Image (cartoon, grey):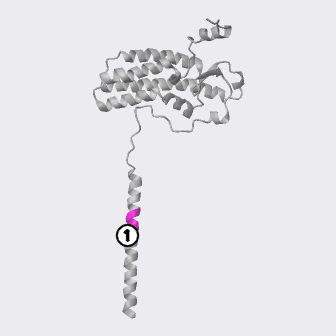
Amino acid sequence: MPRLGFSSLLFLVWIPTRIRACLQCDTEFKSNIAKLRTDVVPKQMRDTRLKARAEALLRGLEGDFFLHYATSQFSGLAVKAMVDALLQEVKVTTEKLLLTKSTDEDLLEKLVEFRRKTTMKLKKALKKHQIEGCDEKICGSLTYEVINCKRCLPAGAYCLSLSQCFVDNQDRLALRFGEPLVDPDIARTGVAVVLCMGGVLFLVIMGAIIVYWRSQLYRYV
């Protein structure tokens, strides 16, 4: 067997030491969410409509829900220590959810509340660096680590660019489940109907005037 070099030994030692990352980068978090979606929800939710909502919610948490939140509302850089603590907390919470006896609406509400609380705590980690990284007076002297939620990589805290500081310019994510219901725009519809009726009435009046003047012309010819 070839001997392992010193760098190779260091690599093997490093492998078990998992680098903490944003929620969607953590394999244990994603694994627990997947178990909730594939094991708990199908067994404990009889209402097909609620089951579909729960599965969609969990599929989003497995995917890019947190990444989208971190990068669309903030710079995507969060205080690493705060995210590490949050990962430990959500591990405990998801393990409890895996053992829950709740069904249907109760279970869906628990999942919705879990997503809301988790997102708000991630927000604190993102917002802290957003504020301090955009402060020219202190950003150069920051000593804590941040985690890049897009690349899943840690780095030392650094000053943010102007575009990163004003990244929060998109619509807020709905923390309740599902897409917002689109109510019919009664005002817009009403205006459209009135304009159409007005146009038809105008054409009728113009037609009547033309017919009248033509009849008058024929009368005197």
Instruction: From the viewer's perspective, tell me whether residue 15 is left or right of residue 111.
Output: right
Taking 37 as reference, is 209 above or below it? below
Q: Position of residue 6 (x, y in %)?
A: 67, 7
Span colored in magenta: 195-202
Place residue 101 in its image quadrant.
top left
Taking 129 as reference, is 170 above or below it? below
Q: Amino acid at mark 1?
A: Leu
Which residue reaches farthest front?
Answer: 1
Magenta-drawn stretch contains 63? no
Q: Which residue is mark 1?
A: 201
User: What type of secondary structure mainly makes up the magenta span?
Assistant: helix
Instruction: From the viewer's perspective, tell me whether residue 136 is left or right of residue 29.
Output: right
Q: Is residue 138 visible?
A: no
| Residue in view at x 64 percent, y 36 percent | 163
| Residue in view at x 28 percent, y 29 percent | 47
Determine whether the residue tagged by mark 1 lies in a helix, strand or loop: helix
The residue lying toward the viewer, choosing from 19 and 12, is: 12
Q: Position of residue 213 (x, y in %)?
A: 40, 84
Q: Is residue 194 visible?
A: yes
